[in-house]
Image (cartoon, rainbow, N blue to C red):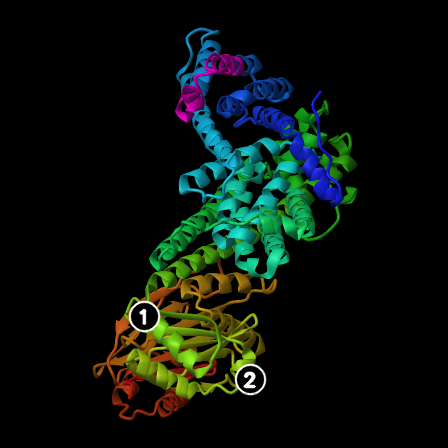
Amino acid sequence: MKNSSDIIGLSFADRFLGRLRSYSDILSYLGVGVLSFLLSDSVLFYQIAPFGVAICAAVRGDHTFAAVLGAVLGTLAAPALPFKMKYIAAILIVGAVKWALSGKGRLQRSRVISALLSGLAIGITGMAVSFVGGVPQTYQLVLCLSEVLLAGGSTYFFARTLSVLDRQDAVPLRQSDLSCVVIAFGLLVVALCPLGVGEVSLGRIVAVLVVLTCALKAGEAGGSIGGVTAGVACALSDTAYAFMMGSFGFGGLMAGVFSSFGRFGCAAALVVVNGVATALAALVQPVTLAPVVEVFIASVIFVLLPQSLFQKLTLSASGLQTMSADSVKNIILGRLYHTKKAIGDVAVITQQVANRLQECLKPITDINAAAAERVCRSCPQRGDCWQQNFNDTSSALNDMQSRLRQGKLLTLECMPEPLRTVCRDPQELLFALTSCYNEQRRQEAQYSKSAQLRSIVLDQWGGIERLISDISSEITRIAVQDEQTCLRVREYLSRRGIRTRSLSCYEDEGGHIVIELGLFPSLSKNLDKTELTFDFGEICDRDFDLPEVSERDDLLVLTFYERPGYKLSYGVSQISASGKKLCGDSFKYLEEHGGSSYAILSDGMGNGSLAAIDSSMATALISRLAEAGVGLEATLKLVNSAMLIKSGDESLATVDICSTDLYRGSVTLYKAGAAPSYLRKGGKVGYVESSSLPAGILNSVEFEKTSLQLSAGDIIVLVSDGVTQTGEEWVLDELERFGSENMQALCERIATLAKLRRSEVHDDDITVFAMMLHEAA
């Protein structure tokens, strides 16, 4: 009889855990058996299930019996597994060979031998089954070879993972060990996904818990890796949940971003991302609420778990070297690239699925034929109506369709006498004709609405894809982290007694230094920003502009950009259409931001208040996104989607943007349906015109982009189409003759002349926005 010890004087939890440790061997056998049972029930592509064989080959020798027993029972219990005897035979082969190798420690512990053993066992049984019905086809041989490779690879990953779990020390994981653990976790999720209550899956709940834990303990990287792995595993278990590859991957990333707010922040971020992704997926395919419920359940469990569990779970960094800034930058760029590609693939797949679904639908195209199919199919007199008198019958039904299109009801009196006399059930024919007509109208309305929603969603996906691409480009422009400058700035701030929460000093691709300080708001009230700017210039031997001030959560962020070599002077003049209080044009000028400035001009459809609303919405959205650093191509896609869904009425606005790089003196003109822009460059005048469409009229609107290199004294003029209704030559003449540097005077003169030249037929709003480039003092 085996003796056991009791634990006195401790809490119930400690005593219970102590008692469990005394039965650790029994629990390990039980755990291996349950794991083998679950993995043997994991079927990929409805045909192959090599994971039960793989886990039997991967476990330690003393766990072989438990693994074989669990795998055999799991294979027998698998409802959707074909050729069960093939897998049972392979499991028994693995068990027999491992029993024969017992006592030969080196061979028994070899992961390569284990991988070869499982692959060989699956290959032998698979080929035997393939040859039962004669010579196998090429497809069967390829499938068998694929299963052999999958069995061998899975065995190796399982063996590496089990060896990691058996470790008693705190040695940090190598990258290869971590990769094997991640893959093994994914396979376990595939096995657990079929288990649950109704459509709520235990496997996906476990997956969400792991993703949240990775995000909490390892930040953005851990959340992204865990989310991508869990999403792929859920998609492999059921293709209906393929959208989880994106929602879990991006959700894990966002959970890592919000990990500084603790468990609640991680859970809230993943719940929001998953909810949005599920709603978007529901626009193109039937989706249940199961993913939302699963993430909610897992998040509640995650928040309610004892804090002590997470305190014990630490990622040891001993013996590891800190990654360089370039390594971190490359990892982030790689993640962003794959995320951008995944979002682009989602948009493509969404469109492809929508096209296939449309092909599968069978809309009513011929109302007369559909009505006749319902009423006349079993009528013995159908030959009289649809063969001998086909033209008369068709003409009568077409006339009644015309009444329906006019919104009138069909009565017996509107049916021609010959047809009413011959028809056995004229009332039923009228009812069928009305029903088929209404059904066709409903289908047309539904298709039109679905197509519009799909186009908006695809445009938004395109905007998000472009946004991620812009973020990648922005990170790429951060050429190097300037550690020496950062150290000098930190020492200076320490001497001044200025406490910072964060400090970054880096150079962009043009070699311009950027310094970013994160301060407590209470400490920044008495801070002399002018003195700080001057002192940073002395430290870095550069000239800086006064800092841009922004708020980020509970921090006040000061960003110091190196002073550009150029500056802009500008002017603007507006004249409303005759009899209108509001101008339908809207403009916005964004002052220097990181060496760039933006002039934005939008012309709403028509004139007056409705046009003013459209143009103001466009300029407000563009300016807000541009201030946040969003690229202009991504901005246009997002603004276009917003205008498409703003109201049911037609709503459009032209977009004209002049982006100026004040470091290099170059400008880029972005036009979407906008009027020509005029320039005077080196004393010569010209204009840039566009044939693109305005925002809000169609999906997938694109900018036409033109880049120019300017010099000091060159002028750019943006105008609305109220200026160009009477031609362009007179504007070029005025621009060529203008001899002052007063841009306001130039704008007022062009606007006044445009008003005098316009006619009553072409009475439109007038806006002129002019800029001149100067060398900075």
Q: Amino acid at mark 1?
A: Gln
How far across and how far down the image is residue 730, in percent?
A: 31, 84
Q: Which residue is mark 1?
A: 484
Q: Secondary structure at mark 2?
A: loop
Q: Is residue 425 above or below residue 146?
A: below
**Which of the two discs, 1 and 2, labels the residue nearer the N terminus?**
1
Quarter in which the N terminus is drawn: top right
Res. 269 image quadrant: bottom right
Q: Is residue 582 above or below residue 177?
A: below
How far across and how far down the image is residue 441, in percent?
A: 65, 47
| Mark 1 vs mark 2, CA separation in Å | 60 Å
Q: Is residue 8 above or below residue 424?
A: below
Magenta part of the protein: which range? 90-116
Q: Is residue 741 above or below residue 358?
A: below
Q: Is residue 115 magenta?
A: yes
Q: Is residue 633 magenta?
A: no
1 and 2 marks in contact (CB < 8 Å): no
How far across and how far down the image is residue 11, in percent?
A: 74, 45
Residue 580 is marked as: 2
